[in-house]
Each structure stands twice: as C-alpha cells, then as structure tokens.
Image (cartoon, rainbow, N blue to C red):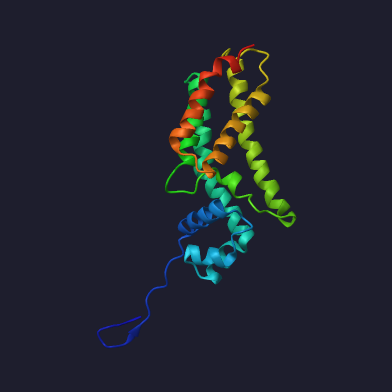
Amino acid sequence: MSKNLKGTIVRGRPKKFDRDSVLEKAMSLFWRFGYEPTSMSELIEGTGTKPSSLYAEFGSKEGLFCAAIEKYLATYGQARDAILEQDELPLPQVIEQLLRASVEWFTDAEMPPGCFMVAATFGMSAADDALFQQLSQQRNSAEKKVVECLECRVGKGELPDNTNCVLLGKYIVNVIQGMSVQARNGANRDELSGLVDIFMSQWAGITAV
C-alpha cells in the first residue's frame, strides 16, 4: 500500500498470476523429486503462489502436474519431433542429433538432471495409476515418433526393407532412457557424449541386414 498526494491510502495493484512462471517452477520440483514426494505445500512455497490462486488455476496437485507435463512436451517434445522430421538429413545424422540433444537436455545445469517423463514417476503409488498411465502413453508416443521416422527411411531406401523398425526404435529409446538414468546418477555431459560416440560407431552394424 502507498499514499497519494492527498495522503489517502492507495492499495497496490494485485500481482498478476504468471502461469508460465508457476508451471516452470512446479515442473522443476516434480522433475527433481517426483510426483508423490512433492507435497502441495512445497509446490505453494516453491512457486511463490497463494494457495487460492494455485487451486483456482489448476484445481489440484494432479491438475498442476498434468499442466507441467503439457509444458514439458511443448518444449522438449516439440524439439524432439523437429529433429526427427529433418527429412533432408541422412538418418544417422538425425539419430545422432536426437541422442546429443538428449545429452544436452539431461545435463542442463538450469534444470534437474535426466528426463522429466521418467523422473516424475518416482514414488508414484497405486492411487496414482491414472497419472502413471498418462506418462506411459506419452513415452509410448515418443517411441512411436522414432519408429515412424525409421519406417519413413525404409521407404527411402536408407534402411533395409526387412528392418524391424519397432524393435530398432525401442532400442534407440532405451539408449536415451538409459542416459537419463545415468544423468540422474551423476553422469556428466562428457560421459554421456561418450556413450553416444559408442552407439554411433556401431550404427552400421546395428542397422545391417
């Protein structure tokens, strides 16, 4: 509050609710500690938001978590898809870009280590099955994007006609998820980049008939 020239008390304009900023902070908390271990009181304190504002905007902790998932996918999911959709690049370059981008995301000093979609499931109980299934569906969707990229390259003759794209896609995604776990366990960017080097050095053999 402040006073005008006549000495009358004037109330300051209410602070505008910054939804994007709140989601960024909430996502970071879920990412670092997992869904279940992160309490609503920690979310209120961590986002610097009044409980009434948080509940009015998201309805519940589950609603806030779902919104955080959407924000993550809008950032990292779209970036992943953009890499996979580079039809002008040879497939090995596309896959290497995907792996190296994942390394950068998993070791970004501004964010918790690893992948949000993997880390956020930590501590989920049976009561959280609906949320767990939602995350699983999103991870399956990400895997499907990789498979679709591979299938497209089979059609272009970059992979043999008898390539098992589903299995190869699952293998690539497992490499990415493994690096996420390694990042959570303290692996640094150089170490994860070394894993990419090893994978790409084996690419010709992996994709051979």
- In this image, 58 relative to 137: left or right? left
Residue at image x 59%, y 37%? Answer: 177
- Res. 128 visible in picture: yes
Answer above or below: position of 192 versus 4: above
Answer above or below: position of 5 versus 65: below
Quadrant of the image containing the C terminus:
top right
Q: How many marks?
A: 0
Name the residue nearer the viewer: 14 or 173: 173
> Where residue 137 appears, x then y in whole percent?
67, 42
Residue situated furthest left in the rendering: 5
- Res. 98 visible in picture: no
Quadrant of the image containing the N terminus:
bottom left
Name the residue nearer the viewer: 194 or 104: 194
> Where residue 23 appears, x then y in whole percent?
51, 56
Residue situated furthest right in the rendering: 126
> Where residue 53 appears, x then y in whole percent?
53, 68
Answer above or below: position of 16 versus 156: below
Residue at image x 46%, y 31%? Answer: 193
Residue situated furthest bottom in the rendering: 7
> Which quadrant of the view contains residue 204?
top right
- In this image, 107 relative to 160: left or right? left
Residue at image x 51%, y 19%? Answer: 201
> Where residue 182 appears, x then y in whole percent?
54, 39
Name the residue nearer the viewer: 76 or 186: 186
